[in-house]
Image: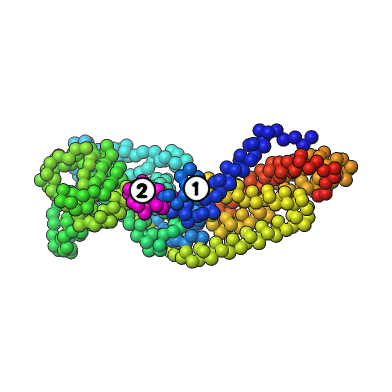
Amino acid sequence: MLDIPLWKRIVIWGLIALGLAFALPNAFYSRVEGHNDALAEIETLGATPERTAAAAGWPDWMPNSLVNLGLDLRGGAHLLAEVQVTEVYADRVDGMWPEVRDALREARDEVGTIRRIEGEPGTLAFRISKPEAMARALEIVRGLARPVVTLTGVGASDIAVAGDGDTITLSLTPEEQAATDDRTMQQSVEIIRRRVDEVGTREPTIQRQGADRILIQVPGIGSASELKELIGTTAQLTFHPVVGRTTDSTQSPGPRQLVLPSVDEEGVFYIVEQTPVVTGEELVDAQPAFDQNGRPAVNFRFNPSGARKFGDYTAENIGSPFAIVLDNEVISAPVIQSHIPGGSGIITGQFSVEESTNLAVLLRAGALPAGMTFLEERTIGPELGQDSIDAGRIACIVAFGAVLVFMVLSYGLFGVFANIALILNVGLLFGLLSMIGATLTLPGIAGIVLTIGMAVDANVLIFERIREELKTARGPARAIELGYERALSAIVDANITTFIVSVILFTLGSGPVRGFSITLGLGILTSVFTAIFVTRLIIVTWFERRRPKTIEV
């Protein structure tokens, strides 16, 4: 009656062995972490005796996935940033000026000449010389409108155009502003993630909070100021035509012109046109390099659209200076010597090797679409993280020991079997966390402690059911079989409802709530597996060997 096919036994023990193998590296955390770091450095920077020795600290044929430690356990930096989403509106409408200008120029005979004027912030204003043709001009400009690509903005246009006398004003519609805000936040989150990932930090938490805020938590980084330096730089790279240069910072530029300081030449300022020819958004690659004089520099390459603009401009302006501007500072202003096709070039300046590498990282990750204000910043030292680990370890040991003692006192030998399954359950849980690369936080430790308490719940149901079956004078084999069969529905129902709750917590929660839900959900899976399959296999194996006439649960 208690018959488990051989293939099932092989599968059960095979899954246990696999889970424990993935959990094993966590018992040698420092050694495996050094091995992983050394392999990554060898791949990117090349092999050295020290890196090779560190990589040899753990066998290559063994799993090397670890449970990542969260900010509260490892220490690191915490930032809460507010994105200035309204800054993007002005850039959007400013970028539409060339398209509007070209469209109206084609109808110059009808609307006359056009001239841009200063308007309200976030608007584009210009005058036409033939006010009587205002209706035709509005028709042309409104023809440039595009539909808003969002579910809430279906049927709306992206621009609102109004005319008054001889002046036309263009602005973004509320629907397009909402869509722009959403895109700005998504882009900011992704760019911050890429910048943080570039420096090799482990499992950062970067997520949107509310309408215009981003939570950034990076374990293992030195301080909040270091994190701010990494992500706080806008790294907005633009290429502008140079109008002139001056040593007077108070000089008033012409319309649609800017006065920007030079990084390399102290006291020198460049007057450039405000609208750039090409922007960093059209960059597809940037790598640290050296120029022809052996000085650190950065090679860059544009996408096809940027390459076409860059090539056309250099072909038409040979002999003219061209300003390369990074965050409103002219880092280089070379003279165009010849047509530069292909969309590639080099940025030179007074860089160190480290500065050229960091600049390449920022340009590769992309420019932040808007500025950020840091509302909250904290640095969590590794000592605090170690205290949290020690406290969590004590909690787990106390909970684990109490459950082991309770099960032995309550169910005797069957309690020992349940304890063996409980130990395997914790090992499988850490194996799953390692396999998926999960991050363990203090709430995650709380989930593990709760899992330890809940793990024996299924065994308690089964053992109590076996006790009931033994009272009906059935033999021990039949009592064990019926105990598992009749307790199964209660076990599945109870754990499914708890698992659903953990899924809801993971879906709707954030940060600590998600950490708790992950360990709770995975703990439920391993608990059900060990209770229904592992404990039963252990009991059946014992029963086949001993063949007892009676059993005492």
Which residue corresponds to mark 2?
Answer: 42
Answer with left or right where residue 386 lies relative to residue 321. right
Magenta: main secondary structure equals helix
Q: Residue at x 38, y 50 (%)?
A: 52
Image height check: is 308 above or below 268?
A: above
Tell me where residue 392 appears, x and y as whole percent. Answer: 58, 61
Image height check: is 203 above or below 339?
A: below
Which residue corresponds to mark 1?
Answer: 65
* Colour convention of the picture: rainbow
Tell me where residue 485 appears, x and y as whole percent. Answer: 77, 39
**Residue 156 is covered by the magenta coloring:** no
| Identity, as a three-letter code, of the amino acid under mark 1 | Ser
Image height check: is 121 above or below 5?
A: below
| Identity, as a three-letter code, of the amino acid under mark 2 | Ile
Q: Residue at x 75, y 35 (%)?
A: 3
Answer with left or right where residue 82 lies relative to residue 11. left
SS for tag 1? loop
Tell me where residue 106 appears, x and y as whole percent. Answer: 21, 36
